[in-house]
Image: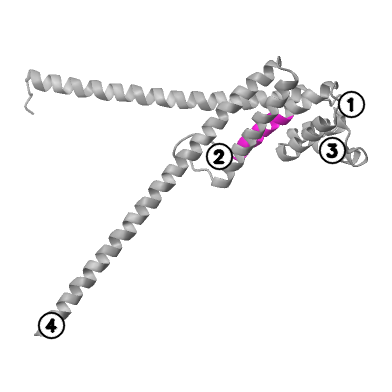
Amino acid sequence: MKIINNPFFTFFVKKNKMKALHASFACRRRQQATFARITALSLFLCFLFCSINAFSLFTDYSKLTPSELIQMLEKKQIDNPQNPIINYNLGTAYCKVKNFTQAASSFNRAFSHAQPTDPIRNRSIFNLATTLTQKSTASLPQNWERPDVKIEDAVLDAAIKDCQEAIASYEKLLLLDPADTKGQTNKKYTQELLKKLQAKKQQQQAQKNDQQQKDKDKDNKQQNQGKGKQSGQDKQQSKDQEN
């Protein structure tokens, strides 16, 4: 094999190697940034769940499983549907089994029926907000932020709605207690989550529009080809008739 000893060739090879190296580093940085965003979101959701449990009032129910506790509290709620403590405990029990829809309803009832000076009122609206945030991501696929991961439109719309309702609940909490630091932090992260979900919706809509345009162009091309073929056949038939 002949060795090329040309300074211009050597410079060209080194330059291409440097470009490839920079591209590799850039790709690695993007992957690390994506992983960091997903990790931060996971830690935040974990923090939300821990925040709900931190306000649990289950001191009298420690020997019961979540399912047993739910059955017992549901029976108590029938007799006392407006009792804020029963509804609050029931909401926390539903969270333990990840039934976020029922949990949100229970926390909302606890908030609505608690006295203005009762500490459980603020705790209920806080837990309502964190539950709605958890509910917003519960049905999303793993690594949903990746551009190649598709989310059904109905699922994505429901997640966005839950996030919006969570932010509204945090705003209610902060009106009652502007100094609530957990509420301030959770609201900020939920707003960031909402932006990510809305960006995902825009991305999927753009992909859908692009695919629809491609399908339309393909159909038009096939129709034009069909017309051209038919026109050629008509011309040949005319020639045959003339002969």
Occupied quadrant, residue 190: top right
Which callout, 4 or 2, points to the residue nearer the camera?
4
Name which of mark 4 and mark 3 comes first in the sequence: 3
Question: Which residue matches tag 1?
Answer: 60
Residue 241: x and y, percent? 14, 85
**Which type of secondary structure does the marked residue at label 4 adopt?**
helix
Which callout, 4 or 3, points to the residue nearer the camera?
4
Q: Is residue 218 left or right of residue 11?
A: right
Residue 141 disc label: 2
Question: Which residue matches tag 4?
Answer: 240
Residue bounds of the magenta highlight: 128-140
**Which type of secondary structure does the marked residue at label 2 adopt?**
loop
Q: Does the magenta portion include 59?
A: no
Q: Is residue 133 left or right of residue 2?
A: right
For the rendered model, the colour scheme is: one colour
Residue for point 55% across, 39% down: 141
Q: Residues within 10 Å of mark 4 (few under 14, many from 20)?
A: few
Name which of mark 2 and mark 3 comes first in the sequence: 3
Question: Which residue matches tag 3?
Answer: 68
State if disc 3 and disc 2 touch (CB < 8 Å): no
